[in-house]
Amino acid sequence: MKKRDEKLEKQDKKTDAVCEQELHEGDDLPSARLISEELKRERNKIRYRRILKSTLYALVIVAAVAVLIATLILPVLQISGTSMEPTLSNGDIVVLVKTSKLDRGDLCGFSYSNKILIKRVIGLPGDSIVIDENGTVFVNGKELSEPYISEKGLGECDIEFPFTVPENEYFLMGDHRLTSIDSRSTVIGCVEREQIVGKLLLKVWPLSELSTID
């Protein structure tokens, strides 16, 4: 009997020790406030990830739309060379609008040897062009007013005058007449309507010269 009591007493002591250990461990359990704060942090992380993902998707869509617009509607080009001075300088960035309907005096871009060149429309289909030795341009017998050029010049010219612009083609010239290679030379000749990429709309760079293009 005495041995049995001693055994039970030992078991009680073990039980008390385990309970005391569990109570001490329970003291380390987070409070309701800490649990709530942790849940808020996790929810904020999830919300942040969703916002970040949505923002990235939006940026991708905007970039894709911008590329489509730049390719299909408003091509953006950087000017290379001096053939369009003083109107456009090397490094200028311009925006074109897609069209094949041009008027005399318009600046346009056209495809040539896997490049896009920028020139000014001088003659429309059916026009008669004459350029004298001083570089003065006559269209249909009348001298063409050209306030956009700084110096006249015959330039590189190997065609005979009077020159009649063929149907569905344009006679184009650069504003810097002494250096521009254009429709005055048989290397380029008149430009077919199908070659026209678009009409210049804006100069966007440098920003200090942001303006429409005449």
Image (spheres, rainbow, N blue to C red):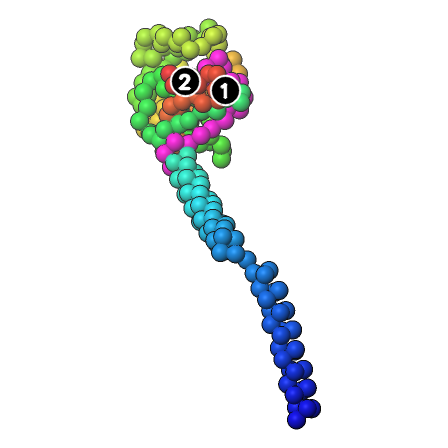
Query: Does the residue at mark 1 contact the one at mark 2 (Cβ under 8 Å)?
Result: no
Residue occupied by mark 2 = 211
Residue 152 visible at all: yes
Q: Residue furthest bottom?
A: 1
Tell me the quarter of the picture where residue 111 sits. top left
Q: Is residue 180 visible?
A: no
Other residues around mark 2 within 10 Å, as few (<14) / some (14–19) / many (≥20): some
Residue 48: say if magenta.
Answer: no
- The residue lying at 41 percent from left, 37 percent from top is 66
**In screen coordinates, is 9 left or right of 96?**
right
Residue shown at the point (41%, 34%) measured from the top left: 70
Q: Which residues are magenta?
A: 72-89
**Residue at 44 percent of width and 30 percent of height:** 76
Residue 145 coordinates in the image, percent (x, y):
36, 8
Give, as a three-letter code, the residue at label 1: Pro
Q: Which residue is mark 1?
A: 206
Circle 2 sits in a helix, a strand or a loop, which is it? strand
Q: Is residue 86 magenta?
A: yes
